Amino acid sequence: MTQIAQFVERAEQYAIKSGQSLSTISRKLLNDGKGLSRLKEGGQCTLKTLDRAESVLAELEAALNAPLVREMSHLDRLEAESIHIMREVAAQCENPVMLYSVGKDSSVMLHLAQKAFYPSPPPFPLMHVDTTWKFGDMIAFRDRRAKEVGMELIVHINEEGVAQGVGPFTHGSAVHTDIMKTQGLKQALDKYKFDAAFGGARRDEEKSRAKERIFSFRTEQHRWDAKNQRPELWNIYNTRVQKGESMRVFPMSNWTELDIWQYIYRENIEIPDLYLAKKRPVVERDGVLIMVDDDRLPLEPGEVPMEKMVRFRTLGCYPLTGAVESEADTLPDVIQEMLLTTTSERQGRVIDSDAGASMEQKKEEGYF
Amino acid sequence: MSHQDALISEDIIAYLEAQENKSFLRFITCGSVDDGKSTLIGRLLYDSKLIYEDQLASIEKDSKKSGTQGDKIDLALLVDGLAAEREQGITIDVAYRFFSTDKRKFIVADTPGHEQYTRNMATGASTADVAVLLIDARYGVQIQTRRHAFIVSSLGIKNVVVAINKMDLVDFDQSVYNDIEVEFRAFAKELGFADITCIPMSALDGDNVTSKSNKAEWYRGPFLLQYLEDVDVEERSLDLPFRLPVQWVNRPNLDFRGFSGTVASGMISVGDEIIVIPSGKRSKVKSIVTFDGDLERAREDMAITLTLEDEIDISRGDIICRKDNPAEQADQFQARILWMTDKELFPGRQYLMKSVNKTVPVSVTNIKHRIDVNDLSETAVKTLGLNEIGVCTLSLGGPIAFDAYDQNRNTGSFIVIDKHSNETVGVGMIDFALRRAKNVVWQDLDVSKTVRAEQKNQSPVILWFTGLSGSGKSTIANLVEKKLLDLGRHTYTLDGDNIRHGLNNDLGFTKADRIENIRRISETAKLMVDAGLITLTSFISPYRAERQMAREMVEDGEFVEIFVNTPLEVCEARDVKGLYAKARAGTIKNFTGIDSEYQTPVNSEIEINTVDMSAEKAAEVVVQYLEKNGYLKGPGE
């Protein structure tokens, strides 16, 4: 078959697939509505003309095929996997809840939940375990977002801890976190009898998390037994629990910190302002900048809070969350800083700075 | 390389936009402890600049404490996670690691290579598209190499990289490399890989890992990362037939009814004609709904919600297919099962099977053979233990839609769950349906006694227990029923308690009433046999003629008379319910054995003398009889 004959055949094929008439295509390819039929009847053209027409045709064919083989980017795939996990819980568990910690990961998780069930609202409530020492801005953001999304918001505070006056300054960070956060979470799960709780943890956060299952089985005492986790193959998840037992479900297990930021940027997801740099009153404690969020922060004699341009890389209890000095006051700037920075995300979190395996211990005890 | 991109500091927005369209690859690394697997992954993370300073500092600290590389940083410590493992110096579970380049994001399943960790390797392989098999250049293809290759091929991985590692220790000798390549390709022939790429490498020094090594000039192929960035694993799966396993029915209000799920394979467009398996109902796609707006088309791996033109009943676990190429459906399969727990797999025991989105009861009817993961030899076995792989036949509590695992990993895979502990005890890959119902929709299948019985993997029968009051009929019948239940069989017992109080509460104990009593019981038992059940009846049934009537109501072989032969004196001495005393005292009339006749059977299939035999033993005799006479398998077998 001659080159011209092949070209004509391709053009005809394209006409069938695209549903356009041959003369239309002929105009597009050869600037001449009758060009194709002339070629078909044995007419000739220059090689240059044929080359140009072939490349135009290739573009047209590509455009026609493009939506057929639409590539899924890594973010599309991560999103789809998270949605699959959330739907599985909604379909299989009796009483699920989404733990909402107000941070950027929770913001992404909430956004994914909206996507998973659209046009229905997510068929479970949000729950925040409030240690009473969160940044004021976090609480305002939390209440507003829950209302906007139209989900029920459960706020649980460990009242026993409050009654005992537990706080990071009086009891130290470890005791405070254990009582107000870990114990508070267990209380809340017991109180509402949730059999599945979504969390925003990711495997890239810390070494022991790398082996965490997506559906993480917990005993009635909320314990995590590293050696007794269920195998997870394909995307088939075993969601079955006995009464009293529960699942912690991590739909964003396979996301990395960079994925989170890219996704927030791509999807334009709202996150608390605390992530962006702003002038904030801070004091320096053991080399860590702590924001004076309210008047409960005891100041040393003569200590005066300084106004500094700071932002936060993670959000938690304000006395336990170190700020970093930064000029990054837009999302791209924050991502830029993150990519250029050389220390990992959890470093700003006081709780992790113990021995290497500390997170594993905490998890066995029921920390999320 | 990647995240050192100059764009980050110069134009972050341009960088972000460029990064949005990365592709994605999941791969698994296999090798035994000393092949340098963790070092390889550590190297990939390290060279992709994904280790932060504080992490590196802690690794440096740990390297001095427990590292094995002297003054060099022990990169393996980056990936050896759990405390117990770090002490033992081995990885004992699957760990997932992440890194990315400008082109791709990668998820690495890091799995241990010991024989006892077959299950972990299978776990890692189940979601991977590429396997990187490490071979120590000094030792060449080992038994474990064969094992790893077999496991990844069983899990359906088509693309394999053979990383011939520690080439530095053999001076990058090309002939060493060639010998290993030739040997590997020879034995891998039968494993069905689509593509095998061998790479000479030193993970420790980074040769041919993230850049081309200048120590192996003779090697012309890609370095590892180059291969991983370029390998195309998508092409094939998009051409597969469309499958949407329904995960969740989306009904926000009466006007919207959508079917949510993740597309398991293929593509679908608005307007396409669909068929639902197993119901066989048909319709057309009305819309493809997502939060970001309706789509014209959807493809594999997308999490979507479909709405249809017609209101048809679809529930979770159904698979929506394109009409031109529907999934198969069946309730009996041959499958390969990998057992994952210490408690052995016993044929006949009931488990739960979860395939795509559907959970159904399942029992293994037969283990054809076990496959030795080291040399692929086949051995006949009665049970499967931890980490063993067997070819089995399965019987399900109901039909499911499926494809063969070879054809479709998403719709051909399943997990096995223990009914009591809820643990995941095994996983499986469907080979084929035993009774083909290909492209036949469920309503078209004639539901007969045979079909019902086959589904239950048994031949229905009436076990007719007869004997005096207090002879032990009900005790034995109850034990038999329990044993059958344990074997995964479907049974029902008719006895005085459930018949006299309901169906027959208008009947007394005169001869006429006794005959009517037995007639109704026989009719009921017959219906149950038609339903495919093993039906136990426990009545004195004193008259030969009525027992014969019952026998003649069902087909040959469907009636087994069990004469519980306990002498009157013994029954009267036991007098469990105090009835003999009352009969002797005259307060009960027409009591069999006292003032009413018992006609001893003459041609019972089984006779049990309870004076010589315990009830437990008697029950065993009955079950053995059933087993021996083929009642515990389907009528077709």
Image (cartoon, grey):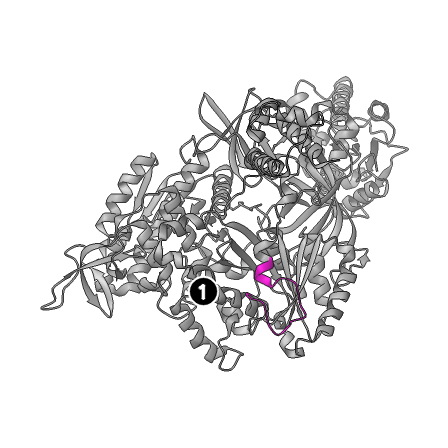
* Residue farthest along the right direction in this orientation: B602
* Main secondary structure along the magenta-highlighted residues: loop
Q: Is residue A324 left or right of residue B463?
A: left
Q: Which residues are magenta?
A: B210-227
Q: Residue at x 78, y 27 (%)?
A: B449
The image shows a total of numbered marks equal to 1
**Chain under disc 1:** B
Q: Position of residue B631 (x, y in %)?
A: 81, 38
Q: Is B197 or A169 nearer to us in this picture?
A: B197
The reply, left or right, for residue B541 in relation to residue B254 is right
Nearest the eye: A61 or B588: A61
Residue nearest the observer in this picture, B400 or B240: B240
Q: Is residue B352 visible?
A: no
Q: Secondary structure at mark 1?
A: loop
User: Does residue A91 lie above or below B17 as drawn?
Assistant: above
Q: Is B222 included in the stretch rendered in magenta? A: yes
Percent coordinates x, y for residue A40 in the rendering: 69, 26
Would you place residue B334 above or below residue B203 in this image?
above
Q: Is disc 1 surrounded by few (<14), some (14 to 19) or many (20+) residues within 10 Å? A: some
Per the image, the residue denoted by label 1 is: B49
Residue A302 in sight = yes
In the rendered image, the residue lying farthest to the left is A302
Direction from residue B282 to residue B347 in the image, left or right: right
Q: Position of residue B538 (x, y in %)?
A: 74, 32
- The amino acid beneath tag 1 is Lys
